[in-house]
Every structure is written in C-alpha cells, then in structure tokens.
Image (cartoon, rainbow, N blue to C red):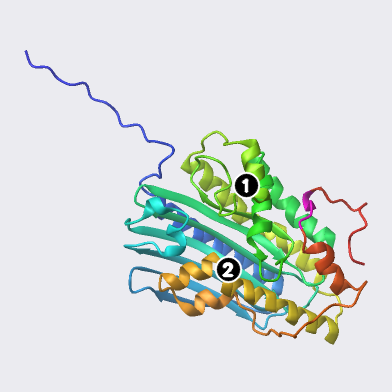
Amino acid sequence: MIMVSPQTETVPNKFLPPENSRERVSEFMRSIQDEICQGLTEVDGVGTFKQDTWERPEGGGGRSRVMREGDVFEQGGVNFSEVWGHQLPPSILKQRPEAEGQSFYATGTSMVLHPRNPYVPTVHLNYRYFEAGPVWWFGGGMDLTPYYPFAEDAAHLHQTLKKVCDAHHPEYYQVFKRWCDEYFYLNHRQEMRGVGGIFFDYQDGQGELYRGPHPTKAAAEYSKKIGAPEPRGWEELFAFVQDCAKAFLPAYVPIVQRRRGMAYGDRERNFQLYRRGRYVEFNLVYDRGTIFGLQTNGRTESILMSLPPLVRWEYGYEPEPNTPEAQLTEFFLKPQNWAEWSQSDTTSKG
C-alpha cells in the first residue's frame, strides 16, 4: 500500500513581509511624494518643484524634488529613494546587529521645508522601510521647528498626529512623542531642535515600542511601564505608516496659512537665520538619515537638501529677557504636553 502525504496549504505569516512588500512600499513612497509636492505647490502659489532623478552605482536610486524662491518656501525638498546592497552601514548595524552579513533593501520619502517668513516654522518628515534577510522594520516621523512659535500651532500638529496614532494603538503617540523629543535633541547645546512631533524606528511589531539607544530616558521608561503590546503584523504597521504620512498636509498647511502673511523685519529674519544654525548642526552631527545616506554612497546633493539656503552663527548670542526670542528656548524648546493644550491656556505668544 502506498501512503500519500496529505497536501497542506501554506498559510501566510502575518508577521513576515508579503512577497511583494518592496513593490508595495516603494509605490506608496512615490505616491506620497507626489501628493505632498502637489499640496505644497498649491499652498505656495508661486514656486514649483524641480525634479532630478539619480542612480546609485551599487544599486537603486531616487528622485529629488526641490523648490526654491517660492512665495512661502525659500527652499524645500521632497525626496524619494530606493536603494539596495550587500552590507548595511555601521549606523544601522549598531542598533540591529542581527542584520550583520545580510544584503539589504531600503526605501523611503523624506522632506524638509525652510519658509522665508520667520513666523512660518520649518518642518521635517521622513518615513522609511528596511529589509535585511529575515529582518525588517518601519521607521520615521514628523517634527516642527518654529522660530517664533505659537502654542496653537504646536498643539494643532500634535493633536493631528495623536489622532492618527490613536487610531492604530492607544500608546503609539505617548511613546513616539517622547521618542521624538529625545531624538531631535542637540546634546552639545542641551536643547531640543523644535517642538517635536512623533518619531519611531525599528518597528517590526515585536517587543516593546521603544527601540532606541537611551534605556533610561522618558520614552524608554514609559515603554517599559506599559510593557510590550500585542504583536502587530506587517500589514498593520504599513497601514500606520501610510496614515502618518498622509497626515502631513492636514498637520502643516493650516499653520502655514495662519502665519504666512505676518509682517516681519530684520530682527526676526536675523533670529531665524541664527536658529537655522541649530538645524544645520543637528543634521550634520546627529541625523540618522544623513549618516545613512553618506555611509551608503547616496547622492550627496539629495542628502544635504535638508540644509537651509541661508544661515548665520553668532558667537555667544543670548536673547534679551522677556522677549519672544527668549520664550522660544525657555518654554517651547522643552518637552510640553501639546496634545492637551487648549485656547484657554496662556502660553501662546501674542
């Protein structure tokens, strides 16, 4: 008698990427670049994006879109990249040593906008996806860097992001907001870069939400306190990243529209250029995207697109007491519970 083994149907593991994961994420990253560029072009009303496509000799490439001398945006860029290779750079392996020796794939969209009016804040966005052998993860976030800040603007951005986060997990915002405060921090200046937003990395649906390098700071402590959530699959995390990226225009455009017409003079412009120096310092010293791009032989012009067109440093500058410039560092560049702010609060400038 011949024994025949019963046929078994292969059931997809929801915790592993689907076979077409790279194509799906790449398609989305391209589409969100298109959506954001269209929205920003409409908001600016004058400037348009110039596109450069580029190829990476080791594998992959991208398309960089830059707007210069617009009505609102002095300079800004929205980049898409998709690269692959045989070895992840040290900046990644330091956090994910299990990916050592694996070939990798990475794709994402990143953006930095530098408005001309000092009352319109600079904004940054980045969402990305990595695969390296059996290892995969999503990362990214969005943050706001005002020069003359308004509490209602910070609250609007945080409330918009919290709504998106809460729709996917009740603890996402609480962890990722704290993580953002810690990540966009200039240690050599002992100050935050701006009023934060959300930031997350190495999200593969397993373990605690915080996967960063500071186990004793607020994000890690909060993450430990709530413990590891229920495992989340690839599709769940991809859906979360998509919703976060789509929230950019609703989070930022109303702020631009409120502030673009405000009058300013040399004092405000000079302070804006001085504070832009902090942006340059962070991006060249700490920013993971900059470091990853340079370590993987990315396109330098696209990597450094995040830097402002004009900037100034002033030795030993101290703002005058009881001025808007002093209020920036004394209050706004410290962690605040922006998502709970309301118009009845009195912390807003003006």
Question: Which residue is the site of mark 2?
Answer: 286
Q: Is residue 286 magenta?
A: no
Q: Is residue 13 left or right of residue 112?
A: left
Q: Is residue 277 left or right of residue 332?
A: left
Q: Please tell me the numbered disc located at residue 192.
A: none
Quarter where residue 154 is shown:
bottom right
Front residue of 229/91: it is: 91
Q: Residue at x 39, y 44 (%)?
A: 18
Percent x, y of residue 234:
47, 43
- Residue 220 disc label: 1
Query: x and y percent of residue 271 in the render?
Result: 79, 80
Image location (x, y in percent) of residue 59: 34, 68
Point out the image quarter for the C terminus: bottom right
Amino acid found under the numbered disc labelled 2? Tyr
Residue at the spot 41% in from the left edge and 64% down from the top edge: 89
Q: Which residues are magenta?
A: 335-339
User: Which is nearer the N-term, disc 2 or disc 1?
Assistant: 1
Tell me the element at label 1. Answer: helix
Judge by depth and name the residue closer to the eye, 51 or 164.
164
Q: SS at mark 2? A: loop
Instruction: Pick the residue in front: 95 or 215.
Output: 215
Residue at 73% across, 64% down = 253
Residue 337 sits inside the magenta stretch: yes
Question: What residue type is disc 1 on?
Answer: Ala
